[in-house]
Amino acid sequence: MNTIYILNGPNLNLLGTREPEIYGKTTLADIEQMCQDFGASRALAIQFLQTNHEGQLVDWIQEAAQKAQGLLINPAAYSHTSLAVRDALSACQIPVVEVHLSNIHRREPFRHLSYVSQVATGIICGFGADGYLLGLQALLCLLGNERGPRRS
Ligand code: CA2
């Protein structure tokens, strides 16, 4: 069974409680349930984690590189600031999908640069909570367990 780590960065624990006009009403617990249900339907073990601390995120990225076959990450504000998160991801030998609920390119200019995008295998943004499922689908394609768009 493949294991996928899903890592969430700072303030994502507040989802669904504030700023619903930007991030929607879905809570992080709802998103985890969606991902666990998807994982159960595809024989994927999902490790879903959230932290407000940069070093913890780096530790979990390193752990994922050892224990998982794929990594889905919403680094939240650390996308735009953290070379430590970027470097940890750069050292990962597994596929990495970066996900954002909002379309960061339609927002403030300081959100347009993500250091993580430079080292991610692929990026999904602007699809709200569904982006997590799209990201899991992308990882399955990358792992060869799912028909991708260009496969016959
Ligand atoms: O769109 C995304 O998923 C983001 O990663 C969310 C981050 C933001 O810094 C990125 O630029 C884009 C912010 C997560 C904070 O989420 C909150 C949720 C509710 C209330 C306050 C913050």
Image (spheres, rainbow, N blue to C red):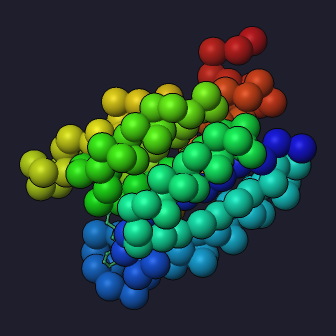
- Residue reaching furthest to the bottom: 17
Q: How far across and down, in percent of the image, does residue 106 sit?
A: 19, 49
Can residue 33 be seen in the rendering of this structure? Answer: yes
**Count of residue discs:** 0
Q: How far across and down, in percent of the image, does residue 22 sit?
A: 28, 69
Side (left or right) of 141 relative to 16:
right
Q: Residue at x 45, y 32 (%)?
A: 90
Q: Residue at x 30, y 43 (%)?
A: 83
Q: Name the foreground residue: 34 vs 85.
A: 85
- Residue 142 sits above or below residue 133 on the image: above
- Residue reaching furthest to the top: 152
Side (left or right) of 99 relative to 40:
left
- Residue 151 sits above or below residue 63 on the image: above
Q: How far across and down, in percent of the image, does residue 127 sit?
A: 43, 53
Q: Residue at x 41, y 72 (%)?
A: 52
Q: Name the foreground residue: 86 vs 123.
A: 86
- Residue reaching furthest to the left: 109
Question: Which quarter of the figure is the N terminus placed in?
Answer: top right
Q: Residue at x 39, y 61 (%)?
A: 54
Can residue 124 be seen in the rendering of this structure? Answer: no
Quarter of the displayed picture in which ligand 1 can be seen? bottom left
- Rendered image quadrant of residue 138: top right
Q: How far across and down, in percent of the image, does residue 59 sit?
A: 54, 55
- Residue 112 sits above or below residue 12 on the image: above
- Rendered image quadrant of residue 95: top right
Question: Which quarter of the figure is the C terminus placed in?
Answer: top right
